[in-house]
Amino acid sequence: MDLDAWERDAIAALPAMVADYYAGGARSEGTLRANRSGWSRHALVHRILAGVREVRTAASFAGVRVAAPIVAAPTAFHRLAHPDGEVATARGVAAAGSAMVLSTLSTAAVEEVAAAAPGRVAFQLYVYRDRGATRALVERVRAAGCRALVLTADAAILGTRFRDVRNGFHLPPGLSLPNAAPEGRTMDGDGSGSVLARYVADQLDPSLGWGDLEAFLADAGLPVWIKGVVHPEDAARAAAMGVAGIVVSNHGGRQLDAGIATADALPRVVDAVAGRCPVWVDGGVRRGTDVCVALALGADGVLLGRPVLWGLALEGADGVRQVLELLRAELVEALTLIGVSDHRTLDRGCLG
């Protein structure tokens, strides 16, 4: 089955509050829909008599060799989908020969997750008002053996998510956030809107600026990527400062409604970066052909968010493996039919 079928079955199996949290977007969800449709606005042009005997899909993400240019994006609260949460996700990622970016809002400790997929975990960082707590978290991440920090830069506040407000989104008793400040924070519900929105407003620093990125680059002790970039001028500035990589992202359509689709932002960011660091992209990728389009537009690879959660919800670690391997198989099929034996040779000439 394809990823749409995984999504349909997972949403049917999950409690409504959880399904809505995972699937939903900001306000009218226009950006969410634009992410999905953005890839299909580009047509692939195949070549004939290309003599493709074998397709090579191996890639590198944050210094990790991966089976395909497809890795698991940072998403929160995996224990809402499966009792083993992010630990199961990490096992599935490792089994697929992939890598993952672990969310600050993980329901499993970074040490557990990194141990479940040694050398295959990077860490997505939210910056707290309490910079001491942020520094302590970075020290834990480094000690756990994570490959990189992926600094999220598009969450000064949480975009309004009507589904979560309606459902009074919260974490059930027994689930906590072992990486988040305050340490071991819970998010029990009180029936008055999204607890997550209040947490972000209370704890995260909305004043994050370029000077903070410069400080992280100097002091983190890890390669620092920046996530949430859609403007080419921001991309050029980050690349000039020496970031290890850029993720073109609009937070899965969960922040700014009416925001630019990542498929539309990607080529301008790639041009602005001009090869100074890798550029990866997330948002709405559901087909091997979507991956081809992203690569042809200049991305070095894609991060896959919601589909990983659908696999986790239905079949745990093995579901995560199946989802990642399914998308890789679709990529191999698409490359073969286009007439390309190595994904690194895709360029805009492959697009109609």
Image: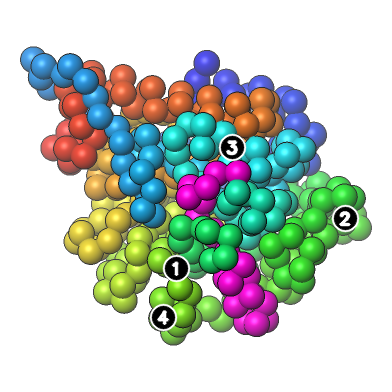
**Alpha carbon distance from label 4 to label 3:** 32 Å
Residue at label 4?
218
**Residue depicted at x 32% and y 54%:** 279
Disc 4 and disc 2 in contact, CB within 8 angstroms: no
Residue identified by numbered label 1: 222
Inspect the image, locate mark 2, and give the three-letter code of the amino acid beneath it.
Gly
Structural crowding at the residue carrying mark 4, measured as other residues with C-alpha within 10 Å and reported as few (<14), some (14–19) or many (≥20): few
Q: Residue at x 33, y 46 (%)?
A: 60
Mark 3 or 2: the one toward you:
3
Q: Secondary structure at mark 3?
A: helix
Of the pair 84 and 20, the residue shown nearer to us = 84
Residue 204 point in image, percent of width and height: 65, 73
State the CA–CA distance, disc 3 to disc 2.
30 Å
Left/right of residue 320 with respect to residue 39 in the rendered view = right
Of circles 4 and 2, the one toward us is: 4
Q: Amino acid at mark 1?
A: Leu
- The reply to whether the C-beta atoms of the residues labelled 4 and 3 are less than 8 Å apart is no
Tell me residue 122's x, y (percent): 50, 55
Question: Is residue 334 at least partly visible in the picture?
Answer: yes
Q: Residue at x 52, y 37 (%)?
A: 93
Residue 91 image label: 3
